[in-house]
Amino acid sequence: MVSVLWTLNLLVSLKARRRQQRSKDKKQNLLIGREATNFLLNESLKLRVVDPERSKQLYSDARKLAERGRFHLSKRHRILFCKTCKTPFSNQTVKVRLNSQKKQIHYRCLICKSEKRFGYSSRKIIGEK
Ligand SMILES: [Zn+2]
């Protein structure tokens, strides 16, 4: 009887240990995925004027990675790309307007004419966590 109990305890602890290991692996994968997407997006931003097609490709790769890893892109990067046509924003591809009554920033893509809005306040700083 004692031996049975002992083995049961061992099994439980093994299961718990496996669960812990799995959550550790998940966290590790998340970190790696975030680092990879940030790298891709930064490369894409560097190439946005020189090679727009490559830049779009890098952005869509990063988005696929984020979808599979189930995490969001950082807010800084979400603002800098058009979600519908995947164009990286530069001074030639975007029009930015502020709405002070609603406290919103309007980004209008000049290629697909889609618009997105972000709220702003005096406390929030974009690009920081
Ligand atoms: Zn667009």
Image: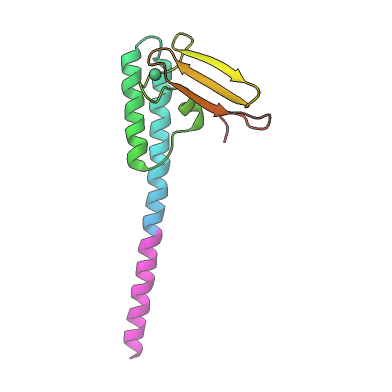
Q: Residue at x 38, y 50 (%)?
A: 26
Above-or-below relation of 58 to 110? below
Instruction: Please provide percent x and percent y for residue 83.
Output: 39, 26
* Residue in front for this viewpoint, 96 or 22: 96
| 102 to the left or right of 75 | right
| Ligand 1, image quadrant it occupies | top left
Instruction: Please provide percent x and percent y for residue 38.
Output: 43, 30
* Residue in front for this viewpoint, 122 or 1: 122
Q: Residue at x 41, y 22 (%)?
A: 82
Instruction: Please provide percent x and percent y for residue 35.
Output: 42, 35
Quadrant location, the C terminus: top right
Q: Residue at x 33, y 27 (%)?
A: 60
* Residue in front for this viewpoint, 36 or 90: 90
Q: Is 127 one of the magenta-colored residues?
A: no
State the image quarter where residue 11 is shown: bottom left
Quadrant location, the N terminus: bottom left
Farthest residue to the right: give it.
122
Q: Residue at x 54, y 28 (%)?
A: 118
Magenta highlight range: 1-20
